[in-house]
Image: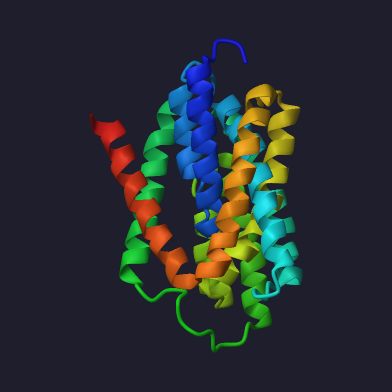
Amino acid sequence: MHDISLTTVLFLCAAALLAGWIDAVVGGGGLLLLPALLLGVPHVPAPQVLGTNKAVAIVGTTGAAVTYVRRASVRIPVKTAVRVGLAALAGSMGGAFFAGGISNEVLRPVIMVVLLGVAAFVMLRPSFGTGEIKDAVTRARVVTAIVLVGGGIGFYDGLFGPGTGTFLVLALTAVLHLDLVTASATAKIVNVCTNVGALATFAYQGNVLWQLAAVMAVFNLAGGLLGARMALSKGAEFVRGVLLVVVFSLVAKLAFDQWY
C-alpha cells in the first residue's frame, strides 16, 4: 500500500465498516465507501478506485446475503433473485468495461444527481415498502425485474457503482411488490452477482489495489453481518428510516464537497 499513510488506512477501514452496515440494512454502502476512497487516495486513478471499491464491497455484501438466506423469518424469492442476479452480472461486466474512461471529476456530480433522485422518490412515497404485500408477482413482473432491474442496474453498478444496493431495494420493492426487508435481502443476492461481474472486469484490467482492499474488506464484512442482523430484527420501518438518514446525509456531504 505505497504512498498511503496509516491514518488514511484507519479512516478507510472505519468507512468500510459503516458502509458494510449501511449496505446490509438498505443498500448504498458505496455512496459512503467510494467518496471515502476518492478522499483518502486522491492520487489513485478513478478506475483503480472503482475496482478497489468492488473488491471491498463484495465481501460485506456476501456476508450479509448469507445472513439473510439463513434466517427463516424472511421469505426470499431465491429463484427470482438468482435470475435477476445473472442478468445483473452480465450488465455489470458491460458497465465495468466502459468505466475505464471515467475520471474523478465526473464521478462526484453523477453521484449527486443519483442521490437527489433517490431522496425525491423516498419523500414522495412515505409508505413505500412498509405495508402488507397483497399483490401476486406475475410472470411479466419477473421478466421486468430480470431485464430492467438486473440488466439496467447491473450496468450502472459496473459503470459507477454507488447506490446500487439502494436502487435494487427500491426497484425490487416497486416491481416485485416486496416489503423493504425482503427487498433488501433479495438485493444482496443480486448485488453479489453485480459485484462479481464488475470485479472480474476490473481485476482483468489490473484496476484493483488488492492489499488495501483486503484490509478494508475485513471491516466491511463485520459491518455487513451486523447490519443484516439488525434489519431482520427491527423490520421495514427501521430500514426505511435508515434509508432516509443515509440519503440526506450523503446529499448534504456531497453538496458541500461540490460547492465549497
User: Residue 247 appears at what percent x and percent y?
Assistant: 37, 52
Does residue 41 appear anywhere in the picture? no
* Above or below, comparing residue 1 to residue 184 in the picture: above
User: Residue 255 appears at what percent x and percent y?
Assistant: 28, 39
Closer-to-camera residue (151/116): 116
For the C terminus, the quadrant is: top left
For the N terminus, the quadrant is: top right
Q: How many marks?
A: 0
Which residue in the rendered view is the most extreme toward the top? Answer: 3
User: Residue 83 appears at what percent x and percent y?
Assistant: 74, 64
User: Residue 33 appears at what percent x and percent y?
Assistant: 50, 38
Q: Name the quadrant containing residue 119.
A: bottom left
* Above or below, comparing residue 241 to residue 9 in the picture: below
Residue at 72%, 65% (x, y): give it. 69
Residue at 24%, 32% (x, y): give it. 259
Closer-to-camera residue (143/60): 60
Residue 248 in the figure: left or right of residue 47: left
Closer-to-camera residue (41/109): 41
